[in-house]
């Protein structure tokens, strides 16, 4: 039976006690053999200042060839965070091209109206080269709505050069078509007592095809125009000089409009009508002829309270079966 002890500064009394115990144990006889118990390492005695021995358990040695490793993460605990990836360069977005502004430039002295048609109120007449921003168009595409000094104006498309208007939508605020006033019946006064008839003055004979003050030239040209039906022409003298201030009237169904040549800033000797605000109804018969001027005409012509509508020229007559534009209709003063 071997025991290893490390004795550090053992006192005499303690040494005697230990020897007696050892002798007694060796003399005892065990009654039967028993299996040896598993040897437990004896404590190590560490001296204290008073000379006592303190038992300490032996240091356990780490098996060779094994390294201490970090225990794995327990269930429920978050894993160690991964290092974030290095940021990548963000591509610079391409600039969006600015859409072209829809606008028009007037090609001539042009009337600006309150709606898409010559039967609308005339706002003003602007000079060639005036530029305006387009804000809409008429359903037939013949008229352009513009920003006219902060209000809505309308220009006939054939009198202007347009750019950037491919995506212009139909205007949503088109004013209703003006309706001419209904004439009222004037009461007829009661007849006065009969008097002897006075001698009536000699009345001049009405103009006839042979003595009209104006004659009609064969100079017109009519072409299909699905978007708008209109008529325009000139008044000239026999030397082909342009004449201003001559009144021309258009009639269909009933008297419609009287205008004067060279008025409204349309150009010397020129007149024009766009009375339908779009295509003319199929089968409409139009008559255009010179009449006596009732006096100075307002901008846009006279559409009621006409003067003497006795023709002063042969009538230019045409029945419209398909929408068209007729130009160059010219009356000559004898």
Image: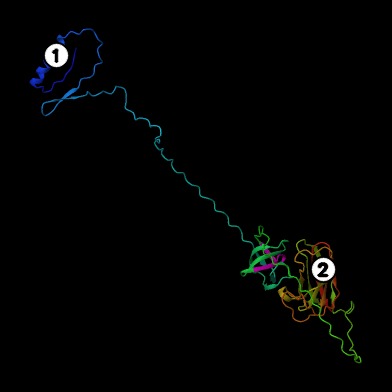
The disc label shown at residue 226, or none:
none
Residue under the point 61% across and 69% down: 150
Q: Earlier in the sequence, mark 2 or mark 1?
A: 1
Q: Is residue 73 above or below residue 166?
A: above
Quadrant where the image shows the C terminus: bottom right
User: Quick check: can you spot residue 260?
Assistant: no
Q: Which residue is mark 1?
A: 22
**Residue furthest out toward the front:** 31
Rate crowding at label 1 as few (under 14), some (14 to 19) or many (20 or more) other CA atoms within 10 Å. few
* In the displayed structure image, the side of residue 211 where residue 97 appears, left or right: left
Question: In the shown orientation, is residue 206 left or right of residue 236?
Answer: right
Q: Is the C-beta separation of discs 2 and 1 under 8 Å?
A: no
Label disc, if present, on residue 220 of the rendered structure: 2
Image position, residue 89 (x, y; %): 47, 46
Instruction: Report the residue at 15% width, 12% height from top.
Output: 25
Q: Magenta residues, as a range?
A: 152-162
Q: Based on the picture, tell me whether residue 108 belongs to the magenta stretch.
A: no
Q: Is residue 21 visible?
A: yes
Mark in the foreground, 2 or 1: 1
Q: Secondary structure at mark 2?
A: loop
């Amino acid at each position: 039976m071997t025991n290893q002890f490390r004795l550090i500064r053992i006192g005499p009394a303690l040494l005697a006690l230990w020897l007696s115990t050892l002798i007694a144990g060796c003399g005892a006889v065990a009654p039967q053999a028993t299996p040896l118990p598993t040897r437990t390492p004896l404590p190590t005695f560490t001296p204290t200042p008073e000379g006592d021995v303190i038992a300490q358990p032996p240091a356990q040695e780490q098996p060779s060839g094994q390294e201490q490793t970090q225990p794995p993460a327990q269930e429920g605990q978050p894993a160690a965070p991964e290092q974030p990836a290095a940021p990548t360069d963000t591509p610079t977005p391409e600039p969006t091209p600015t859409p072209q502004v829809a606008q028009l430039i007037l090609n001539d002295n042009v009337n600006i109206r309150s709606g898409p048609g010559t039967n609308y109120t005339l706002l003003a007449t602007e000079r060639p080269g005036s530029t305006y921003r387009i804000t809409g168009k008429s359903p037939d595409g013949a008229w352009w709505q513009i920003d006219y000094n902060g209000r809505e104006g309308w220009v006939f498309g054939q009198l202007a050069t347009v750019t950037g208007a491919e995506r212009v939508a139909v205007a949503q605020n088109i004013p209703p078509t003006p309706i001419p006033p209904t004439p009222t019946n004037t009461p007829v006064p009661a007849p006065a007592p009969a008097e002897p008839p006075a001698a009536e003055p000699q009345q001049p004979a009405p103009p006839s095809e042979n003595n009209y003050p104006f004659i009609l030239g064969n100079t017109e040209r009519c072409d299909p125009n699905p978007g708008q039906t209109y008529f325009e022409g000139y008044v000239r003298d026999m030397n082909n000089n342009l004449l201003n201030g001559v009144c021309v009237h258009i009639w269909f169904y009933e008297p419609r409009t009287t205008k004067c040549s060279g008025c409204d800033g349309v150009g010397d000797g020129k007149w024009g009508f766009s009375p339908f605000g779009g295509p003319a109804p199929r089968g409409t018969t139009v008559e255009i002829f010179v009449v006596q001027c009732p006096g100075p005409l307002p901008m846009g012509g006279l559409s009621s309270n006409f003067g003497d509508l006795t023709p002063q020229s042969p009538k230019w007559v045409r029945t419209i079966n398909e929408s068209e534009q007729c130009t160059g209709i010219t009356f000559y003063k004898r």
